[in-house]
Image (cartoon, grey):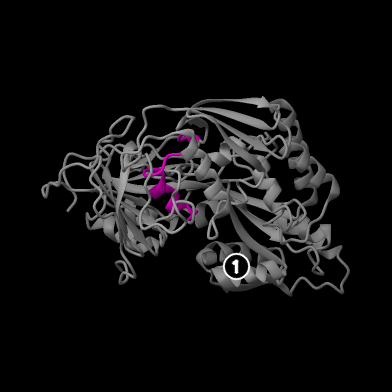
Amino acid sequence: MQRSHVRSTTAFCLILPTAIALVAVFTIDNLSYGTESSDSSRFPLRLALIGQLNSPDPHEEHTISSESVFASVCEKLVEFDGEGEIQPGLAVSWQWVEPATLRLKLRQDVRFHDGRPFTATDAEHSLERAKFHPKGRFRTRLATISEVTHVDPYLLDISTHHPDPLLLKQLAFIGIMPAGTPYGIDAPICTGPYLWTELKPEEHVKLQRFSDYWGITPEAQDVTFQMESNAESVVTQLLAGQTHLGQLNPAWADTVDSSDDLWIFSRLSPGVYYLKFNIERDLPQHPAFRSAVDLALDRDALVIDGFKQYARTANQLVSPNSSGFVVRNSALSRDLQQSNRLLNSIPSRHPVNSVSFLCLERDIHLCSLISDQLADAGIAAELQVFPPKEFHELSEKGLYDITLLKWHNAIHDANDVYANIVHSKDLRTGLGIANDSRLSDATLDAWIEQAMYTLEVDQRQALMSLIADRVAELQVTLPLVWEMVLYAGIQELEWTPRSDHRIAPAEVVVPSFPVP
């Protein structure tokens, strides 16, 4: 197949067994308001995601896959568009009435799936529910909020402990539910274009078009999200004509590309793969060793062999489609001679033939490529591969010299990346939650914290530049590649991939023929 079968929305883009037995079924019973009449001749839009959804509570699940499902059911006060920019949602406008108080004007004439009208009281309840949910996943996103007040039925004030330039982006993850919604629910009642009809964990989620939706009516009347445990299952279903659109792993891109019936959809994502050093260990504490590893890496080869061209070489932890991105020089070119000279400058009591390389099971292919590149420079890395639970336990304990990680920058903002990955770890504030490298740099911390409280765009951008330079200087994290959003779908499908990895059924144009 020619590369014309690859659809990309960015000029720089280069040329994912069936489900296991279901555990439980969550359905909406006796819900008739806003539903459309049953028609056995209708065929659903079928979308395949890699991942599992085990709860019908939008404040309890928080993964890339769950965001796709819940985004079509539960609207937010503000929404991300396909480019990662904030747009009106249930709030039509907003302003900072004080440095630490955001006022939102809410949309009128909106109804929940059960017919109740939407007001500021519902928004107030939803934010408090998400923040204090005992099984919730959004506490850190709402940590700066000190008070939520409904000024009138369609005016909401959100006060924070300090000015928070990321507050709007954090709100774009919090689904709005009716006031009084308890923590234990069988199905979400929200205001989105689709209402929830069924969840079979580890199998599928079914949605139905909401006929009383305030916005544009989506084309697909019924939607099924098929939840798959691995990339091979998605490709198998696509090739068998059992799904319209699904997530694609780069390892399966050639298989999909060889089919005359499928397209590949791609665009740059806000995700970055990077190497991290534990600087409390003997070798990684030496700047010369960290520089030697950087010079041993061939990022272009990783893009080709590790991602089948569906990635871009990275020179910082922040991708170009994120706020706070800084234009910098390209990443270092591979230089094995200079790498070897740096290694020879390290005292002999620190042999480079005993480097532990911690790797997540899913990334074994990429880790192997990196290990081979290091070996070319004389660095013998012992590859240690573990499933997610064991991997994260070992990483938190610092039982590694080098590890490979991926950060998905869900809110498309540089400060979120730096606050999580390179700020000193602080369990009290949640800062540095992904910093297991033992890095602690007072200068870096101060700049990151200052950026967290700075609303003025130019001042924040200047801080981002200082932070990016400091992170590059320290070399405790080595950016490798910015990954691509990658999907495969039938050729008749019309769809533009979003930078946040979500599939929004309302944005998919249903083909003229059904998939059984």
Left or right? Give the position of 50 relative to 420: left
Q: Position of residue 347 (x, y in %)?
A: 88, 68
SS at mark 1 in the image: strand
Vertical comparison of 454 with 302: above or below: above
Q: How many marks?
A: 1
**Measured from the top left, where is residue 11 in percent x and y?**
48, 33
Is residue 484 visible in this depiction of the protein?
yes
Of residues 81 and 334, the one nearer the viewer is 81
Magenta residues span 61-83
Is residue 70 magenta-colored? yes
- In the image, taking residue 16 as reference, residue 27 lies left or right, namely left
Answer above or below: position of 376 versus 330. Answer: below
Query: What residue appears at the point 82 percent right and 43 percent down from the top-left corner?
Result: 446
Residue 117, above or below 339: above
Q: Nearer the viewer, residue 90 or 13?
A: 90
* Mark 1 neighbour class, 10 Å CA radius: few under 14, some 14 to 19, many 20 or more: many
Residue occupying the point 51% across, 52% down: 304
Q: Is residue 269 visible?
A: no
Residue 504 spot, x, y in % from top left: 37, 42
Question: Which residue is under mark 1?
Answer: 359
Q: Position of residue 369 (x, y in %)?
A: 57, 63
Image quadrant where residue 57 sits: bottom left
Question: In which quadrant of the rendered view does residue 434 lie?
Answer: bottom right
Foreground pick, 78 / 128: 128
471 relative position to 246: left or right: right
Q: Amino acid at mark 1?
A: Cys
Residue 487 in the magenta stretch? The answer is no
